[in-house]
Image (spheres, grey):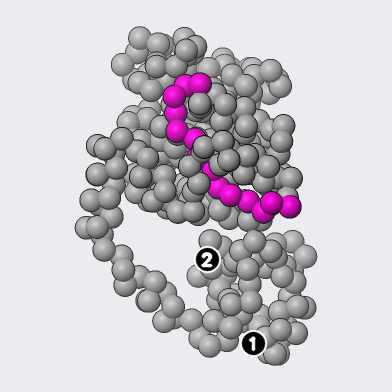
Amino acid sequence: MTFTDPRYPPLLREIYDPPIVLYCLGDRSRPIEQPGIAIVGSRRCSTYGKSASEMLARELARRGVTIVSGLARGIDSAAHRGALDGGGATIAVMGTGLDAVYPKENRKLADQIAARGALLTEFPLNTPPLSQNFPFRNRVISGISLGVMIVEGAERSGSLITARMAYEQGRDVFAVPGNITSSKSFGPNYLIKDGAKLVQTWQDVVEEFPPEHKSRILALEKSDSPADQPLLEDAVLSDHERKVLSLIKSDQSIHIDQLIHACKMNSSELMGALLKLEMLDKIRQLPGKCFVRKL
């Protein structure tokens, strides 16, 4: 897509230095026509950051918001997966050519994004993952979005560079607060002090949308009236499952030995409860027989 192509993202045309050419694999229309929010953050993210990124991406995608990110490890990958889990659209802006997925372990994720959204880059085929390419990628991530949400990021991280570019492009900046003792929380907590919008739920993001997008999303939300759904989900849990779920936190993993000691069940009852909670997508098993609650 050249700069004069009618399919070229209209928001990207507004920035100071838009790419002259974009290469796209996947759906060119739906993801770009929908309002978009970028979700970026640390490659070495915490369990809390990953869960928060997936949850917010999933909830926004369900409501017709395109999730934009950079296909990197950590928060970026979690945001893409959350959008796909929510049945919505997602755009991965790459710092390579379309044929050179980086990191390589995201090849399957890239294929899923191409099938349900779009892979986008300004770099031609055979462009390798050179470090100098990624700041250029970051300006496109913020440029095609209404705003940028930072989930986790250290003091000198690429996510803060993306936030700075968003400010320069006149985009909204959002941040998910983090633990004050964690170095990964420096970025979002600093941005909140600097005036970024604090995000706890998807509504915090939609509230800052232009009126035409905001009113459409909120009108659809009212018409869906999902008020009874949580009650139905709770009803399928047994007493053992509720007890186990109450012991598993979203911000800190717990080992199976700790669960056995805390819940006073035998191992077969506990394993049955954990399996059911995993099948209901309420918890996630981490390496080493540790468990964490999904947001």
Answer with left or right where residue 214 lies relative to residue 43.
left
Mark 2 belongs to which amino acid?
A: Asp
In the rendering, which numbered label is found on residue 281? 2
In the figure, is residue 266 to the left or right of 276?
right
- Residue at the spot x=37%, y=44% of the render? 206
Type of residue at label 1?
Answer: Glu
Looking at the picture, how far across and down is residue 93, in whole percent?
53, 28
Q: CA distance from mark 2 to mark 1?
A: 19 Å
Which residue corresponds to the image point at 70% horizontal and 65% vertical from the top-left?
Answer: 253
- Residue 12 position in % (x across, y down): 42, 20
Q: Which mark is residue 269?
A: 1
Against 173, residue 255 (above or below) is below
Return the mark for residue 78.
Answer: none
Q: Residue 122 location in percent, x, y?
A: 53, 17
Q: Which residues are magenta?
A: 168-181
Please report whichever mark, 2 or 1, sits nearer to the chain's N-terminal start: 1
- Confirm whether residue 24 shows in the render: no
Q: Quadrant of residue 10?
A: top left
Q: Secondary structure at mark 1?
A: helix
Which quadrant would residue 234 be assigned to in this image?
bottom left
